[in-house]
Image (spheres, grey):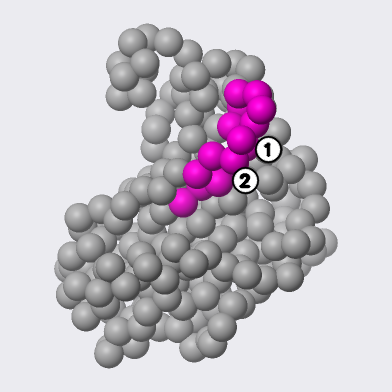
Amino acid sequence: TWARKHLRGGFVGLVHRLDRDVTGACVLAKSPESAKWLSRQIAERRVCKEYIAVVRRWDFEGVQLLENTMSSDDTGQSHEADDSEKGSRSARLVCRALKQGPGGAAAVLVRLLTGRRHQIRFQLAEANGPILGDVRYGSRSDGSWKLIKRPALHAWRLKFAHPRVPHDEFEVEAPLPQDLNGFLSALQIRPEVVMQEAAQGIVHPALEDETVDALDDDAGIAHVARTARGNS
């Protein structure tokens, strides 16, 4: 992989993953000890993971807390589930609009409170704001597939304590990729405005009352990276 080549064959531990075709920041550990440290932080929800999504519409004002119970079928498709359903798990995130275009599409900032497979894509679609370009949870009929060939979702910022003592806070930001910049411009949403707004982050009481979930999907990921791409 690119990471192994960059590290000249050294240890590469994947501790944070993205869905296939989702761009952005991803954490790789350079030692088993660092991988264990970072995985534990993710399990204890001490890693701030923020995403920028471009959705078909957004009907909310201010910061929203989205809560669902979700489950996945044999094909990997996530769906709404009852609490009693086997394999169902709670999914929580907070989000707010960054900028809306004249056609109703909007750039939305998302911060995860749990780490479930396809969580952002599923929850935004359930909130009537499907991510453009996402044919799994959105639609081909909206025409976005002609402008962007993947879900318009980008992991733009990570914050976590660095594994090295004294464990200072470490922040990583990933600039918007070229295809997403062009897509926003086509929707008459200025990318620079989106990034300026995203830099302000999100404030919500739910962020001050996060509890440990030792079974978080991002926790305990194998410390040997097999691929830099997530599951579709």
Type of the residue with mark 2: Val
169 falls in the magenta region: yes
Name the residue that disc number 2 marks: 47
Distance between the Cα atoms at labels 1 and 2? 6 Å
At 49% across and 19% down in the image, what residue appears? 30
Of residues 88 and 2, the one drawn nearer to the viewer in this rendering: 2
Q: Visible in this render: residue 157? A: yes
Tell which residue pokes out farthest to the top in this image.
9
Of residues 82 and 180, the one drawn nearer to the viewer in this rendering: 180
Q: Position of residue 164 (x, y in %)?
A: 60, 23
Quarter of the image holding residue 93? Answer: bottom right
At 72% across and 56% down in the image, what residue appears? 89
- Mark 1 crowd level (few <14, some 14–19, many ≥20, 10 Å Cα): some
With 165 as the anchor, is 137 left or right in this view? left
Q: Position of residue 20 (x, y in %)?
A: 38, 45
Of residues 63 and 58, the one drawn nearer to the viewer in this rendering: 63
With 98 as the anchor, is 182 left or right in this view? left
2 falls in the magenta region: no
At 28% across and 88% down in the image, what residue appears? 103
Which of the two labelled residues, at mark 1 and mark 2, occupies the earlier sequence position? 1
Type of the residue with mark 1: Gln
Of residues 4 and 135, the one drawn nearer to the viewer in this rendering: 4
- Mark 2 crowd level (few <14, some 14–19, many ≥20, 10 Å Cα): many
Could you tell me which secondary element the residue under label 2 belongs to? Answer: loop
Quarter of the image holding residue 92? Answer: bottom right
Q: Is residue 100 above or below residue 126?
A: below
Could you tell me which secondary element the residue under label 1 belongs to? Answer: helix
Q: Position of residue 106 (x, y in %)?
A: 37, 78
The span picked out in magenta is 157-171
Name the residue that disc number 1 marks: 41
At 46% across and 58% down in the image, what residue appears? 51
CB within 8 Å, label 1 to label 2: yes
